[in-house]
Image (cartoon, rainbow, N blue to C red):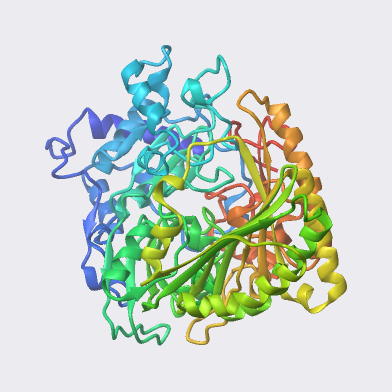
C-alpha cells in the first residue's frame, strides 16, 4: 500500500512541478498552490468564530481541485477514512526514515512545499553555524548563537530549538556548551519542519506524514522535559506562530458548557506572559504557569498545568471550554462537551502529542484579585542540628492543608549540601494583602522559634495582580533553556498522608533521605481546587485531585558526561524516588515534570484513566501517527538503538 502511494507521488511530482495540467495551462500558485480553501469564520461547530488562520483549511474541495488539474495522484495529501481502525489498516511497520528506500525524494518534498505555499523548512540544527563541516558555518553567527542559546525565547524562535536537549540526544549544541570535540549532527532532530501559519499547513503535514508512514512530531515552544518535540527523521509541525488572542467579552455565553462570563479564545502558540498581560489590562486573571515563555495551549494544558491560581480555581486544563483540533485523520474539528466529548476529555490532561494538533482554545477568565507574597528561609547551623532542622520542616509541612485551603501557592526548596536549609520563594497568597499574610504566617514562625530556629530574610510584598507578582517573583532572566545537564523526577503527595501521623512521618523520612543523598529538593504546596462552575471531568491524573504537595528531585552531570554516565545518574534517580513512591502508593506524578524512566508510568502519569485513554488512542489514531515518550499508547512502539535509563530520539521509531 505504501509502495503504491510512493509511486503515485513520483507521478504527481512529474505532472505537478515540471509539466502543464491537462488543458495545457501551467501549474502555478494561482491555480493549484497553496492548497487551501477560505472557509467562513462562523462555520465552526463550536459556535465560536475561527481565527483567520483557522479559516484557511484543506478541504475535500481542495483535493478535488488538485485532481481536476490532472494532479490525479493526490492521495499523499488526502484525508483518511474517519472510521479507520487498527484492524482495517493491517500491520504497523517502522516509520520511514531518511535512509530507507521509501523515503520521499527531494522532488516530493518540493511538491509538498509547493502546496504549503513555502512553509516547509529543511532541518538544520540551530548550532550548525558553529561547525566547519556544515555549509552554514559562520564564526560570528556562532558567537551570537552561543550568547543567546540558554535563553528560552531564543530556543522557541528556532525551528529545531528545544529547551532541554538531553533526551533528544545532545546532537548539536554550541561547542562551549557541550562535550569537548563534540560533532554536530541532525540525529534526534526532525528532517523537515512545517512552520504552521494556518490550519491547512497542519492538515497537509498530517496527511502527508500519515500517507507516507513518516514520523510526525509536534512542537509549540519546546519546553517538554522528555524531548517530545524531537525525533530522528521526523516531520515536525511547529505551532508557535498561532499566537492570536481574542477577548470574548465580560458576559460571554458558551453554549456547550453553559459558562457565562469572561473568556478568551487563544491560539495554541500563545505564551503565558502574553495572556497574563492581556487579561491584566482588562482587570482579569487567567490560569497559567510561573514560566512566562511556556505555550499555554501546547503540552502545558494537555498535561494538566499547575498554576499560582490553582488552589482557588482548579488546574489549568479545567479552564478549557472548547478547542479546535486537527485530528490524525487530517480533519479539522471543534471539540467540546457536545462535539467529540470523549476527545474533549482526553485533550484536557491526557498528555501532549497524542490526540491531535490543537490550533486554538477557549478558556475562562476570572476577576483580577490582589496577590501578596512572602519569602523567607531557615536552616541548620551551629545552634540548630539537622534533626532540629527537620523538626522545623515537619512544622512547615503541617501547615500545607490550611495554606492550600486558603487558596495559596507555596514554592520552596530544601538544600542539603552539606548543611540543610529551606527557602520559600515565595508563599503566594491570592486575594490577600501582606498584613493578612503576616497574620496567617505568625503561628508557623512562632513554632519554629520554639524549636530554636530563626527565620531569616522574611520579606512581604503586595501586588495588584498576577502579572506584577510574576514579574516581581520570577524575573525573565531567571528562566533558562537549551540545557542538557539534568533530569527531573517528581511525585504528587496526597492529603491523606497529612491525615495520618504515621504516613506523614514516613513521607518526611523518605524526603529527608532522598534530599540528603541528592543534595536538593524542589516542592510546591497547593491543591487542584474543586470548581463547580467548570467541567472537571477530564483526563487530568486523578491523583491531582487529592494532592497537597508536588515535589521534585534531580540528577545532574557535568559537561563531559558520557551516555553511560547519564544512564547511571538516571538509574540512581529512579532508585532515589522509590521511597517517595512507597510513601504515596496510590498517588502519581505530574507528567509534564516527571522522569522519562518512571516505573509503571501509565499509572503514575494517568492513574485510573489510562485504560479508557488507551482505547481512545486506538479510536482516534489507529496509525500511531502521533507518538511521544510516555504518551498514551507509546508502549506499542520503541525507538531503536537505545541504552537502558537513557532513552533518546536518535533511532528509528518501530512497532513492538
- Residue 377 located left or right of residue 469: right
Left-right relation of 149 to 110: right
Q: In the picture provided, is 84 more to the left or to the right than 73? A: right
Q: Give how far across and how far down residue 268 sits, in percent.
A: 38, 58
* Vertical relation: 390 (above or below) 417: below
| 178 lies left or right of 365 | right
Q: Is residue 360 above or below residue 487?
A: below
The answer to whether residue 572 is seen in the rendering is: yes
Q: Quadrant of the C terminus?
A: top right
Q: Residue at x 52, y 56 (%)?
A: 352
Q: Outermost residue, top direction?
A: 132
* Labels in figure, total: 0
Q: Position of residue 479 (x, y in %)?
A: 46, 46
Question: Residue at the spot x=59%, y=35% of the render?
Answer: 166
Q: Position of residue 300 (x, y in %)?
A: 49, 59
Percent of width and height locating residue 307:
50, 66
Location of residue 265 by image quarter: bottom left
Which image quadrant is residue 505 in? bottom right
In the foreground, 611 or 518: 518
Is residue 45 visible from the viewing direction of this image? Answer: no
When the figure is inspected, residue 598 is found, relative to residue 191, above or below; the finding is below
610 and 442: which is toward the camera:
442
Question: Depth check: 408 or 575 in front?
Answer: 408
Nearer to us in this view, 291 or 589: 291
Amino acid at each position: 500500500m505504501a509502495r503504491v502511494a510512493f509511486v503515485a507521488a513520483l507521478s504527481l511530482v512529474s505532472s505537478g512541478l515540471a509539466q502543464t495540467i491537462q488543458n495545457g495551462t501551467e501549474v502555478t500558485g494561482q491555480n493549484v498552490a497553496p492548497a487551501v480553501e477560505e472557509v467562513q469564520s462562523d462555520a465552526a461547530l463550536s459556535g465560536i468564530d475561527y481565527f483567520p488562520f483557522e479559516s484557511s483549511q484543506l478541504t475535500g474541495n481542495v483535493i478535488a481541485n488538485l485532481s481536476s488539474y490532472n494532479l490525479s495522484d493526490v492521495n499523499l495529501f488526502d484525508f483518511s477514512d474517519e472510521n479507520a481502525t487498527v484492524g482495517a489498516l493491517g500491520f504497523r511497520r517502522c516509520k520511514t526514515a531518511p535512509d530507507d528506500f521509501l523515503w520521499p525524494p527531494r522532488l516530493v518534498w518540493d511538491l509538498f512545499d509547493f502546496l504549503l505555499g513555502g512553509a516547509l523548512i529543511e532541518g538544520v540544527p540551530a548550532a550548525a553555524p558553529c561547525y566547519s563541516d556544515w555549509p552554514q558555518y559562520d564564526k560570528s553567527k556562532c558567537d551570537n548563537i552561543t550568547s543567546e542559546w540558554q535563553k528560552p525565547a531564543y530556543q522557541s524562535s528556532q525551528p529545531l530549538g528545544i529547551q532541554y536537549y538531553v533526551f533528544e540526544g545532545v546532537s548539536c549544541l554550541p561547542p562551549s556548551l557541550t562535550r569537548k570535540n563534540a560533532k554536530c549532527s541532525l540525529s534526534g532532530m526532525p528532517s523537515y519542519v512545517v512552520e504552521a501559519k494556518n490550519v491547512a499547513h497542519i492538515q497537509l503535514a498530517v496527511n502527508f506524514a500519515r500517507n507516507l508512514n513518516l514520523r510526525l512530531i509536534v512542537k509549540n515552544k519546546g519546553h517538554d522535559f522528555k524531548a517530545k518535540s524531537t525525533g530522528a527523521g521526523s516531520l515536525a509541525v511547529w505551532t508557535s506562530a498561532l499566537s492570536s488572542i481574542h477577548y470574548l467579552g465580560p458576559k460571554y455565553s458558551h453554549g456547550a458548557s453553559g459558562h457565562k462570563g469572561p473568556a478568551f479564545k487563544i491560539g495554541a502558540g500563545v505564551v503565558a506572559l502574553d495572556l497574563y498581560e492581556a487579561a491584566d489590562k482588562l482587570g482579569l486573571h487567567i490560569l497559567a504557569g510561573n514560566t512566562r515563555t511556556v505555550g499555554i495551549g501546547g503540552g502545558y494544558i494537555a498535561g494538566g498545568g499547575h498554576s499560582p491560581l490553582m488552589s482557588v480555581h482548579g488546574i489549568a486544563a479545567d479552564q478549557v471550554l472548547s478547542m479546535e483540533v486537527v485530528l490524525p485523520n487530517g480533519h479539522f474539528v471543534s471539540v467540546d462537551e457536545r462535539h467529540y466529548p470523549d476527545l474533549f476529555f482526553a485533550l484536557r490532561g491526557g498528555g501532549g502529542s497524542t490526540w491531535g494538533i490543537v490550533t486554538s482554545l477557549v478558556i475562562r477568565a476570572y476577576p483580577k484579585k490582589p496577590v501578596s507574597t512572602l519569602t523567607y528561609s531557615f536552616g541548620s547551623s551551629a545552634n540548630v542540628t539537622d534533626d532540629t532542622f527537620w523538626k522545623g520542616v515537619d512544622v512547615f509541612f503541617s501547615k500545607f492543608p490550611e495554606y492550600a485551603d486558603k487558596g495559596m501557592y507555596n514554592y520552596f526548596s530544601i538544600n542539603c549540601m552539606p548543611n540543610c536549609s529551606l527557602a520559600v520563594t515565595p508563599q503566594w497568597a491570592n486575594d490577600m494583602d501582606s498584613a493578612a499574610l503576616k497574620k496567617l504566617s505568625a503561628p508557623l514562625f512562632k513554632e519554629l522559634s520554639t524549636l530554636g530556629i530563626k527565620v531569616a530574610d522574611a520579606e512581604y510584598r503586595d501586588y495588584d495582580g498576577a502579572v506584577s507578582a510574576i514579574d516581581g517573583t520570577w524575573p525573565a532572566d531567571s528562566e533558562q533553556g537549551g540545557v542538557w545537564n539534568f533530569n527531573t523526577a517528581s511525585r504528587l503527595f496526597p492529603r491523606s498522608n497529612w491525615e495520618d501521623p504515621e504516613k506523614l512521618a514516613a513521607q518526611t523520612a523518605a524526603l529527608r533521605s532522598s534530599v540528603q543523598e541528592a543534595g536538593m529538593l524542589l516542592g510546591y504546596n497547593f491543591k487542584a481546587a474543586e470548581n463547580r462552575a467548570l467541567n472537571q471531568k477530564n483526563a487530568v491524573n486523578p491523583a491531582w485531585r487529592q494532592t497537597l504537595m508536588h515535589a521534585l528531585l534531580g540528577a545532574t552531570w557535568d559537561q563531559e558526561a558520557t551516555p553511560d554516565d547519564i544512564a547511571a545518574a538516571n538509574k540512581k534517580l529512579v532508585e532515589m524516588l522509590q521511597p517517595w513512591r512507597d510513601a504515596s502508593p496510590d498517588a502519581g506524578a505530574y507528567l509534564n515534570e516527571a522522569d522519562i524512566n518512571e516505573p509503571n508510568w501509565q499509572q503514575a502519569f494517568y492513574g485510573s484513566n489510562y485504560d479508557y485513554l488507551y482505547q481512545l488512542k486506538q479510536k482516534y489514531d489507529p496509525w500511531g501517527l502521533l507518538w511521544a515518550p510516555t504518551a498514551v499508547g507509546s508502549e506499542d512502539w520503541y525507538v531503536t538503538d537505545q541504552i537502558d535509563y537513557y532513552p533518546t530520539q536518535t533511532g528509528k521509531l518501530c512497532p513492538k
